Image: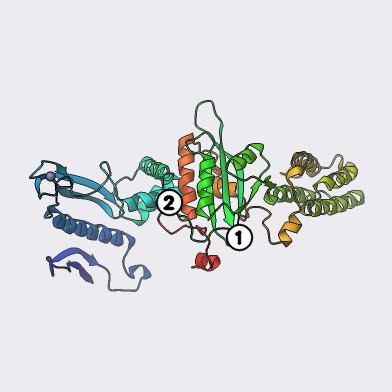
């Protein structure tokens, strides 16, 4: 079977003008399921062909317009023509557009407001940036090329350049303040590292966080330390974006790093920040896993393991109920029975469990000694309906950074590259990039946040 795809222009002047765009030939035999409908290759050709026709018609229409001079208001005349090569989502197009000169005052008029060095449509730039925020530049390029007739700007370097440009532009966008002010806002900051490719530095410190209102409004943010992004100013913008007013109660959560505490203080979080339960829970989970792996090859060890597992559980209870000072009791009880595991055989891959338990216990003890002033009664907060930490259950740092920027150990980043990509990544999740797909969070207070996310 064969079809001719024909575009018929509708509208005042060109009414009824027809253009044959493409001939589609498909087998009429449906013996093979692969014969059903259009193929991806045909769909890409079709989109590209329609794009060429639409652009050509738009250019014809535009070329006969004669703008008025912006300086004196007199009529303009055509000065010359310029070719514009523009990459679009549906292929590269070339547009020939006139430039104008005012007949009265001689001023030059472009007749359009395109960016002077623009070589691509904003929609293409945005989709490139969006995909690049979620996957590597090379994979993003491959996905675009697979799905769409994109035939310009195909190098992953171009994708990177466009994405970082957009990241830089995001910082100058005005904040959309929500209509409803927020009574309380929880703000958490956390830090992580990505590998650096800059001279003399192995790692770049990345600070990330999120602000949340009681109504479910949420924004994530991030900045690479000592980059052009001012984290304190960024936090201020995010607080405004979820409805901070002078009457808003701010509660801060950190991973315990003193540097982050002072950043929160500079951003206007006056009350001392709370140690995020997420970070305690992660350490306890690690401890539980190791305790569960202890060997039980004799009755003494079996009994000791029972004591340890129970005591780790009690430790969780103590910390959850704000009794961090009593953590020592649990740690001491575990130490008392650990001699049962002397000369414990090593696991096939995992090493000696009791030695790992010893190390983990020592690390937790040090952590709690340093952080106990910042722990609270998490159980009481939870029962009162208050936050005990970030609502991103895997941790903001892992959610924002590790998935894209450090899972693959080969990835090395420049300070600027990591920082600007992070701006795009945050914008994707916040729904502020401009495209709506990929959005995870409500930008502001919403009466039906869950419904909106499900839709
Ligand atoms: Zn003029």
Q: Residue at x 48, y 68 (%)?
A: 455
Q: Residue at x 10, y 42 (%)?
A: 105
Q: Position of residue 420 (x, y in %)?
A: 45, 41
Please tell me the numbered disc located at residue 214: 1
Q: Nearer the viewer, residue 113 or 203?
A: 113
How far from the left and from the top, in percent, is residue 276?
68, 49
Q: State which image quarter holds ligand 1.
A: top left
Disc 2 crowd rating (10 Å Cα; few below 14, some 14-19, many 20+) is many
Q: Which mark is residue 143?
A: none
Residue at the image point whose x is 74% and y is 42% from the top = 371
State the scheme by which the image is colored.
rainbow
Of residues 439 and 266, the one drawn nearer to the viewer in this rendering: 266
User: In this figure, which residue is indicated by the disc labeled 2?
Assistant: 131
Dot 1 falls on a residue whose secondary structure is loop
| Left or right: residue 328 compared with residue 247 | right
- Residue 414 visible within the image: no
* The N terminus, quarter of image: bottom left
Instruction: Return the residue nearer the eye: 162 or 444.
Output: 444
- On screen, residue 227 versus residue 268, left or right, reads left
**Residue 392 appears at what percent x and percent y?**
60, 54
């Amino acid at each position: 079977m064969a079809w001719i795809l024909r575009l018929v222009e509708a509208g005042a002047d060109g009414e009824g003008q027809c253009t044959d765009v493409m001939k589609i030939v498909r087998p009429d035999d449906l013996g093979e399921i692969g014969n059903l409908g259009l193929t991806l290759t045909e769909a890409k050709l079709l989109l590209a062909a329609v794009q060429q026709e639409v652009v050509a018609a738009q250019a014809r229409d535009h070329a006969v317009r004669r703008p008025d001079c912006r300086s004196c208001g007199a009529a303009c005349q055509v000065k010359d023509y310029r070719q514009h090569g523009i990459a679009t989502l549906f292929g590269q197009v070339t547009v020939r557009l006139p430039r104008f000169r005012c007949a009265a005052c001689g001023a030059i008029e472009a007749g359009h407001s395109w960016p002077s060095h623009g070589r691509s449509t904003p929609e293409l730039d945005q989709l490139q940036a969006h995909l690049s925020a979620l996957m590597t530049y090379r994979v993003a390029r491959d996905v675009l090329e697979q799905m769409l007739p994109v035939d310009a700007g195909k190098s992953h370097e171009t994708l990177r350049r466009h994405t970082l440009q957009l990241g830089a532009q995001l910082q100058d966008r005005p904040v959309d303040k929500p209509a409803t002010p927020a009574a309380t806002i929880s703000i958490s900051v956390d830090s992580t590292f990505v590998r650096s490719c800059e001279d003399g530095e192995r790692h770049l410190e990345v600070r990330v966080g999120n602000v949340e209102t009681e109504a479910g409004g949420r924004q994530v943010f991030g900045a690479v330390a000592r980059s052009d992004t001012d984290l304190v100013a960024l936090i201020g913008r995010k607080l405004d974006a979820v409805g901070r007013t002078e009457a808003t109660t701010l509660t801060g959560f950190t991973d315990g790093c003193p540097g982050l505490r002072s950043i929160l203080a500079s951003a206007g979080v006056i009350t001392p920040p709370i140690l995020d339960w997420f970070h305690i829970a992660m350490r306890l989970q690690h401890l539980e896993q190791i305790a569960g792996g202890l060997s039980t090859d004799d009755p003494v060890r079996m009994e000791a393991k029972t004591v340890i597992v129970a005591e780790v559980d009690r430790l969780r209870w103590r910390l959850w109920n704000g009794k961090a000072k009593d953590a020592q009791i649990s740690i001491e009880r575990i130490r008392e029975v650990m001699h049962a595991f002397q000369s414990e055989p090593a696991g096939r891959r995992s090493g000696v469990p009791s030695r790992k338990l010893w190390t983990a216990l020592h690390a937790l003890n040090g952590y709690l000694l340093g952080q106990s002033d910042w722990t609270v009664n998490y159980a009481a907060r939870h029962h009162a309906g208050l936050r005990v930490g970030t609502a991103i259950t895997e941790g903001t740092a892992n959610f924002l950074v590790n998935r894209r920027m450090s899972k693959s150990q080969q990835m090395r980043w420049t300070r600027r590259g990591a920082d600007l990509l992070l701006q795009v990544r945050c914008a994707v999740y916040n729904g502020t990039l401009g495209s709506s797909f990929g959005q995870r969070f409500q930008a502001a207070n919403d009466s039906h946040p869950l419904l909106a996310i499900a839709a």
